[in-house]
Amino acid sequence: MSELRNGLLDVPAPGEPAAHGRTWTTVRAAF
Amino acid sequence: MDPLGLRGRTSADGPQGETRSYSRRVGVGRDERAWVRGAQAGSVSDLEALFKLHWPRAYRAAYLVCHDSAAAEDIAQEAFLAAVRALDRFDRRRPFGPWLHRIVVNRAIDWSRARTLRAEVELHETAAPTETGLPSGNSRTVASALASLSPEHRAVIVLRYLLEYTPGEIADLLELPRGTVNSRLRRGLDALEPRLREEVR
């Protein structure tokens, strides 16, 4: 199953870096 | 050909036949407990450490279930906001991941069901990987095959093979009977196998 797991890990997730920054800003503000 | 080694597997199988608990597998330890404790005491840096540890997998899990980047961002964000709101009540003896993943995956399933009901065009983003210059090959094959499953089946596959929960843990997270989880895993793998074989030909 390592190929399946690697495939799941490698599937491009569009917008991930930008979403990371936006989400942290929102979470930080709510803290 | 058995491109992903699916043949002969059972729903109880998993990466390396893993049977250890989530905490042991992902190495939840003193660092995470200390970060939870620190965040509960108001430490932004400890909250950020928790966020950096857990957000990428939470986002990826949401994305793989709903196949919509905007929805995945909303879902992962709402899960973390729920975590922040409930932080005071969180039992730091327990791992943070399962608690977060429960919210993420259940919301991703709900979102996907709602989209199906709205009869919107599904999975348009999964056709994009090679167009965007992002990785292709095995990851594209997996994305395409996963997209053929229902949200419920995608969810158990993601929980099992991305987040590495045992079927019993998945049953707890989704509040489903263990037999239902096993059935969805088996059906999901059965549906994935021919598509994956076809695509690597």
Image (spheres, coloured by chain):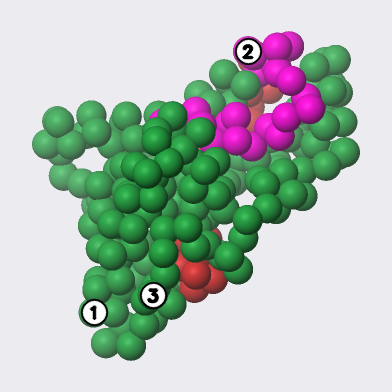
Chain colours: A red, B green
Dot 3 corresponds to which residue?
Answer: B8
Dot 1 corresponds to which residue?
Answer: B198
Identify the chain of the residue marked 1, using the numbered disc in the image: B
Mark 3–mark 1 distance (CA, rounded to whole Å): 18 Å
Q: Please tell me which of labels 3 and 2 falls first in the chain.
A: 3
Neighbour class for label 1 at 10 Å: few (<14), some, many (≥20)?
A: few
Tell me the amino acid under the disc marked 2.
Arg
Q: Nearer the observer, disc 1 or disc 2?
A: 1
Q: Are marks 1 and 2 on the same chain?
A: yes
State which region is magenta: B84-106
Q: Secondary structure at mark 2?
A: helix
Identify the chain of the residue marked 2, using the numbered disc in the image: B
Is B187 drawn above or below residue B177 in the view shown? below
Q: Name which residue lies at 51% across and 33% down.
A: B172
Is B30 drawn above or below residue B189 in the view shown? above
Residue B51: percent from the left, percent from the top?
A: 68, 35
Residue B22: percent from the left, percent from the top?
A: 66, 46
